[in-house]
Image (tube, helix red, strand yellow):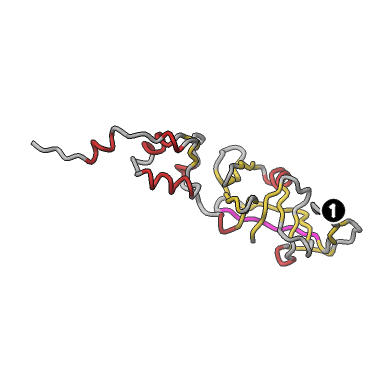
Amino acid sequence: MTWFPDTSANQHVTPDLATLIDSAPYLGNDHLHVGDGKGLNISNIGHTTLHSPKRIFTLSNVLHVPHITKPLLFVYKLYRDNHFYFEFHASVFYIKDFITKEILLSGQSNDGLYVLSESSATSIPQSFWSPSIFAIANLWHRRLGHPTPRILNLLVSSNKIICISRHSLTQCQACPLGKSLYMS
């Protein structure tokens, strides 16, 4: 299931009843009001879970609204119920453990929306959990064993590392020495 974290939402919402576990018909008279002011009917209420390699997250009181176009995660409620935090960046976001700062889930930005799918719940190598994940290109170049600029750019564009400035990659003194041959 794909979800869209939304800091403006005030409820978890899904158009797909099959997403809900232990759902019941919604008996209230409320409607879910969306950006254009339209009130959408709420059909059911229930709960569901999100899975990561390290933890199961509970989504409680999820509204089933058949005419909503995208399933929305109420960021604050998800945080409050599961004790972690979101870290948003321009093209990626992370869900991190509140105590250990370990990355539990991550997602990409797509057409201006952050997208979380259970397929993004992959295990992230420990080297990328570092509190010093933000670094300039020269530092990443040294940390990663002197990869070429093409490889470093690939890692940045696939959100494996976060580079504060790619423009800071200057000629490394060790790289030419490592490629030279000693001849006597």
Mark 1: give few (<14), some (14-19) or many (20+) Cα within 10 Å. few
Magenta region: 45-52
Dominant secondary structure of the residues highlighted in magenta in the image: strand
Of the residues shown, which amino acid type is indicated by label 1? Gly
Which residue is at 89% across, 56% downward? Answer: 30
Q: Position of residue 41 (x, y in %)?
A: 85, 61
Question: What residue is at 79 percent from the left and 58 percent from the top?
Answer: 63
In the picture as drawn, the residue positioned furthest to the left comes out as 184
**Corner quadrant of residue 84:** top right
Dividing the picture into quadrants, the one containing residue 96 is: top right
The image shows residue 114, relative to residue 17, as above or below, that is: above
The N terminus: image quadrant: bottom right
Q: Foreground residue, 89 or 144?
A: 89
Seen at 68% across and 46% down, the residue is: 82
- For the C terminus, the quadrant is top left
Seen in the image, is 74 located left or right of residue 42?
Answer: left
Q: Say which of 46 and 108 sits in front.
A: 108
Q: Which residue is mark 1?
A: 37
Residue 164 highlighted magenta (yes or no): no
Numbered disc 1: secondary structure? loop
Q: Position of residue 85 (x, y in %)?
A: 64, 41
In the picture, measured across the screen, residue 132 lies left or right of residue 56, that is left
Q: Position of residue 171 (x, y in %)?
A: 33, 34
Outermost residue on the bottom side: it is 18
Q: Would residue 37 be found to the left or right of residue 159 on screen?
A: right
User: Is 172 drawn above or below residue 46 in the view shown?
Assistant: above
Residue lying at 23% horizontally and 36% vertically, measured from the top left: 177
Q: Residue furthest front?
A: 167
Q: Is 84 or 159 nearer to us in this picture? A: 159
